[in-house]
Image (cartoon, grey):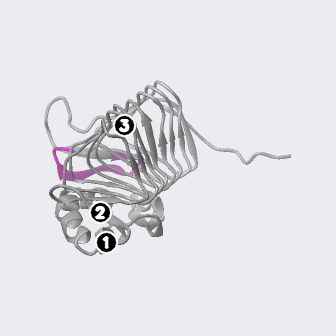
Amino acid sequence: MKGLTVKELYTLDETIAKDIFDGVTYPWEVLPKIGSFIMELGKTLSEDEYEKRGENIWIAKSASVAPTAYINGPAIIGKNAEVRHCAFIRGNAIVGEGAVVGNSTELKNVILFNKVQVPHYNYVGDSVLGFKSHMGAGSITSNVKSDKKLVVVKTPEGMLETGMKKFGAMLGDEVEVGCGSVLNPGTVVGSHSNIYPLSSVRGYIPGGSIYKKQGEVVEKREETV
C-alpha cells in the first residue's frame, strides 16, 4: 500500500541513517538491521565532530547529554541533540540532529530522524520517527502484542503481515502525538497527521489526518485567512 512506504512517510535527507533504507519498501523492514548499521556507520563518523564513548557509542561533540542519562550501545547521538536527565537509551538507537530525548524517556531499537522530540516520560521501542515528529508527555509505543503473536498492520486494503514479534510505531514526518496516547503494535501514522490526547491507536492512519478516536479520523482542512 502506497501510503505506508518509506518514500511516502519520510524525508530521507533528514537522517544520518538514510542508507539503511536502500532497497526497502516499508520502514519496519529496517528494524532488525539497526544495531549492525550503527556499528558500521559509527566507524565512518568524523573524529572532529563525534566522540566515541564506551563500546559502540558515538556522541556528537555538539550534543548535550545529561550526566544522569544512561546510554547503552550501539548508539549514535547526533549533532546538537539533547539527551536530558535520567533518559534511558537501551541500545540500537540513532538520535537525529537537534532531537530531544527527555526526562525518563526510554529508547530501544529506534531511529529518530532530525529534530524529533520525545521529551517527557515516553517509551519508544522498535520504531521509526520521522523528521520533526513529536510525542506528547506520557505517550508511548507498545511494541509487543498481548498474545505475543506476530504483528500485522491493519490497512483499508487488508492486513499486511510483518513477520515481526516486536514492532512499535512508524511515524511519518511532522506527526503530532497527543499526551497520554498509546500507539499499539503495528501503528503507522502518515506525515503531518495529529493524534488526539489519550488516544489508543492501531493500524494505518493516513497522512494529513486528525485522529480523534477509533473510527473517527478526519482529513485536515487548510486554514483560510
Residue that carries the numbered disc 1 in the rendered image: 47
In the picture, the quarter occupied by the N terminus is bottom left
Instruction: Describe the element under mark 2 as helix, strand or loop.
Output: strand
Residue that carries the numbered disc 2 in the rendered image: 51
* Local crowd size for mark 1, using a 10 Å CA cut-off: few (<14), some (14–19), many (≥20): few
Magenta span includes 133: no
> Nearer the viewer's eye, disc 1 or disc 3?
1
Q: Amino acid at mark 3?
A: Arg
Q: CA distance from mark 2 to mark 3?
A: 39 Å
Instruction: Describe the element under mark 1 as helix, strand or loop.
Output: loop
Q: CA distance from mark 1 to mark 3?
A: 42 Å
Which residues make up the magenta segment? 154-166
Residue that carries the numbered disc 3 in the rendered image: 202
| Residue that appears at 42% across and 29% down | 181
Outermost residue toward the right in this view: 225
Pinpoint residue 97: horizontal percent, then vertical percent. 44, 58
Q: Amino acid at mark 2?
A: Glu
Find residue 118 and report its image quarter. top left
* First reached walking from the N terminus: tag 2 or tag 3: 2
| Residue that appears at 46% across and 70% down | 13
**Total number of numbered discs in the rendering:** 3
Residue 169 horizontal side relative to residue 126, left or right:
right
